[in-house]
Image (cartoon, rainbow, N blue to C red):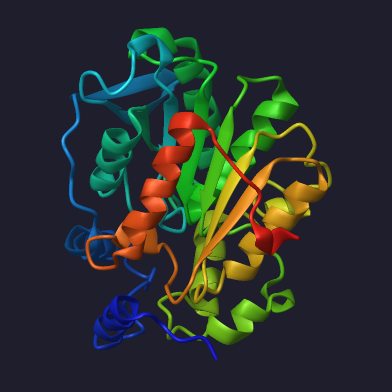
Amino acid sequence: MKVLEPQSAALVSRVRAMDPGEFLDHDDMGALRARMAGFLQACAPRPLPVGAVEKRRIQFQGRGVEVVIYSPPVDTTSTAGRPLVLYFHGGGFTHFSAETHDPVARYLCNKSGAVIVNVDYRLAPENKFPAALEDAYDTLCWASANAHELGADPTKISVVGESAGGTIAIVLCLMSRDRGGPAIARQVPMCASVDLSDLDRYDSWHAFGDGRYLLSRADIDEIRRAYLNTPDEVTDPRVSPILATDLTGLPPALVIGAECDPLVDEAALHARRLQAAGITVRYECFAGTIHSFMILAGVIDLGYAALDLVAGYVQCGSLHEHAQLS
């Protein structure tokens, strides 16, 4: 029996005190987005200072993608050697935004000395699969081509994301490899969903998927309906990257999981599959905490430990395989 650490338990109790059916209710998307924005605002990491913040709208083939670019404080790293991080927020492809994750982006920028591009990709149900992924890929190509203008090194691109954003980071590595796109130096999926096709195969979904730990099977059903055009898209590797048959040639990975997250077995399996494909990977599972705890660092201190780990990794690329993968 897994036991929540005190801060995670306190947050779970607070959410349970609400109407449990309302927390991730997708019936009113505007209400969901407002509710979750308020929730994250109350729980987000402290917003650390950065050197500069710039909002841009990048035009791609008749559509625009909003990004927020964070430059690190002066003297953190020489401009020529600064890493470049594309950050993808979570929210089940339906809610959250670059704005809601501003404190996360600021924290990573300050701690890593990297230029952070916080991507406001299109959301479902207004823009269904694969809109978010195409926004991510086009932004990657733009960031790579404009890295020097952004004050970063195009050979030091990392893709980082949590929950659905972690899924985007994983799939983006596959897309860029298969399309001959920009080289990605590092990938960091945090509490990522890698399988929308079959939750029953994972013990963690049986243990934690009843909604007591914030995320439920019913929530995944809602996400499928909102995100996908047809139910059979769940077997597309861009939706369920655990079904990708070839993981060779992908960048090294830092994979982060949470012990009491329904998605934790998916994270561990993804890390093992990367390792089996010859990819250097570290899997770090944080004990006693919940899904997406790293964006809740304002109330769960373990979130800062995870963000510091990510910041150090994208800064120097030092990575050692974790013993749990053996």
Where in the figure is residue 234, as x and y percent of width and height?
69, 58
The answer to whether residue 196 is above or below residue 167 is below
The answer to whether residue 211 is above or below residue 270 is below
Where in the figure is residue 139, as x and y percent of width and height?
47, 25
Answer yes or no: is residue 269 visible.
no
Q: Quadrant of the N terminus?
A: bottom right
Q: Residue at x 80, y 36 (%)?
A: 248
Where in the figure is residue 311, as x and y percent of width and height?
40, 40
Q: In front here: 226 or 293? A: 293
The answer to whether residue 184 is above or below residue 312 is above
Where in the figure is residue 162, as x and y percent of width and height?
45, 52
Q: In front here: 59 or 308? A: 308
Q: Residue at x 43, y 72 (%)?
A: 290
Number of labelled discs?
Answer: 0
Q: Quadrant of the C terminus?
A: bottom right
Q: Residue at x 31, y 81 (%)?
A: 6
Answer yes or no: is residue 132 visible.
yes
Quarter where residue 33 is shown: bottom left
Quarter where residue 20 is shown: bottom left
Q: Residue furthest bottom?
A: 1
The answer to whether residue 218 is above or below residue 134 is below
Residue 289 is left or right of residue 218, and the answer is left
Q: Residue at x 48, y 57 (%)?
A: 163
